[in-house]
Image (spheres, rainbow, N blue to C red):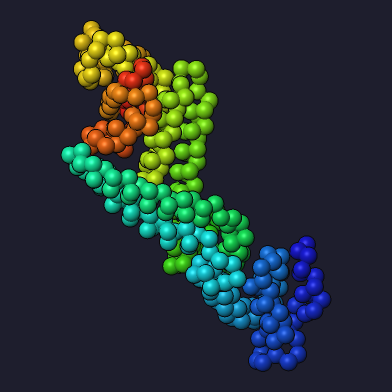
């Protein structure tokens, strides 16, 4: 038996109306006050005890019960509104993140347009791009800190309001069997109720955006962890380059690229051929290696290639990255699509290829 129900039964003889009722058939006033207070309690047992007790009052009390339910519905709706709008005792951690995320999304879209513009290798424009990315870095760091907020207490308070709404909605269905909620199963009712309110809809959007930030952070962390675990075929210079590229892609909200062995073999072979044969070009004089796609297939890469960059002049991954960043077409490839990256180095010769792994 519900642990709160015996208390109500002791306080109020539910089999018959108590004295002092306002009109014939009405529920006792003292019972109504207690039951209505328990109906909006954060304790689920108290709420359930209130519903059960009302229903045991009999048919005469049902009009009052319906009014009590409608009042409880307003209470829970108001509590949810106060939470989402940040006017309760618990600040809404999703709202602060969402506000900054909207600002950052707009900045990312604007800067991405600049990144993908052909500036004809104008040094001043390249410096401008570096400054824009630095500004994005500051915003991104702030957003990531907000994404790490502990939402447990706030979520628990929201759950109380939504659960209360769901319970009251189910009880109201006994008075109106054509309510839209009646066609929704219990598992989906909570989401249905959130989507039906402005505040709930806003909260769902805020939660989705925070989840996107966390998923992006997790994806980039997983890519860097995967690079750390690669075999001896991946040198520290290759990993450093890949991680640098992914960090800058993250600033623009782009997914990471993961180093792939076969595509890297193709890149390493082309860098070695350029160093050995004294040429610097995407087209190779070596038989069967004429195009980047020939080299990728020959190395056994099973995915689809999308672009190739070549660099000569330094063993430092920062130099290779900076050279490609300053060259418009090469920068487009670094910040374009694709989930896979190949990097191959031979002395001062670098080759980079992008593509999509075949799933």
Q: Residue at x 38, y 54 (%)?
A: 104
Q: Position of residue 226 (x, y in %)?
A: 50, 29
Q: Quadrant of the C terminus?
A: top left
Q: Report the number of discs.
A: 0
Q: Residue at x 17, y 39 (%)?
A: 120
Q: Position of residue 118 (x, y in %)?
A: 19, 41
Q: Position of residue 187 (x, y in %)?
A: 55, 53
Residue 263 image-quadrant placement: top left
Residue 354 image-quadrant placement: top left
Q: Residue furthest top?
A: 287
Q: Quadrant of the N terminus?
A: bottom right
Q: Residue at x 51, y 67 (%)?
A: 84
Q: Residue at x 34, y 20 (%)?
A: 348
Placement of 259 over or under 108, stated as above or below: above
Residue 91 image-quadrant placement: bottom right
**25 lies left or right of 149:** right
Placement of 150 over or under 123, stated as above or below: below
Placement of 227 over or under 99, stated as above or below: above
**23 lies left or right of 328:** right
Q: Position of residue 188 (x, y in %)?
A: 51, 55
Q: Residue furthest left?
A: 120
Q: Is residue 50 visible?
A: yes
Residue in front for this viewpoint, 268 or 289: 268
């Amino acid at each position: 038996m519900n642990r709160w129900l015996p208390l109500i039964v002791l306080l109020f003889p539910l089999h018959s109306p108590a004295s002092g009722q306002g009109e014939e058939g009405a529920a006792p006033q003292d019972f109504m006050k207690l039951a209505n207070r328990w109906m909006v309690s954060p304790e689920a047992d108290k709420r359930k005890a209130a519903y059960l007790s009302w229903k045991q009052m009999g048919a005469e009390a049902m009009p009052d019960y319906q009014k009590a339910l409608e009042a409880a519905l307003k209470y829970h709706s108001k509590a949810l509104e106060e939470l989402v709008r940040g006017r309760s005792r618990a600040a809404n951690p999703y709202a602060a993140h969402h506000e900054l995320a909207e600002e950052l999304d707009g900045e990312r879209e604007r800067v991405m347009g600049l990144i993908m513009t052909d500036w004809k290798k104008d040094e001043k424009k390249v410096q401008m791009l570096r400054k824009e990315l630095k500004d994005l870095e500051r915003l991104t760091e702030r957003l990531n800190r907000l994404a790490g907020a502990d939402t447990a207490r706030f979520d628990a308070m929201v759950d109380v309001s939504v659960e209360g709404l769901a319970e009251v909605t189910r009880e109201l269905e006994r008075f109106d069997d054509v309510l839209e909620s009646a066609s929704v199963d219990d598992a989906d009712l909570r989401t249905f109720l959130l989507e039906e309110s402005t505040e709930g809809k806003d909260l769902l959007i805020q939660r989705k955006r925070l989840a996107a930030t966390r998923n992006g952070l997790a994806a980039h962390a997983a890519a860097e962890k995967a690079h750390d675990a690669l075999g001896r075929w991946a040198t520290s210079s290759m990993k450093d380059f890949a991680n640098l590229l992914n960090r800058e892609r993250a600033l623009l909200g782009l997914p990471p690229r993961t180093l792939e062995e076969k595509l890297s073999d193709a890149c390493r072979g082309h860098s070695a051929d350029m160093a050995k044969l004294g040429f610097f070009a995407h087209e190779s004089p070596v038989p069967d290696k004429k195009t980047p796609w020939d080299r990728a297939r020959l190395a056994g890469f099973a995915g689809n290639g999308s672009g190739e960059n070549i660099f000569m002049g330094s063993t430092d991954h920062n130099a290779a990255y900076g050279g490609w960043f300053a060259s418009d077409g090469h920068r487009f490839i670094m910040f374009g699509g694709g989930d896979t990256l190949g990097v191959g180095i031979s002395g001062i010769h670098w080759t980079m290829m992008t593509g999509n792994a075949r799933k």
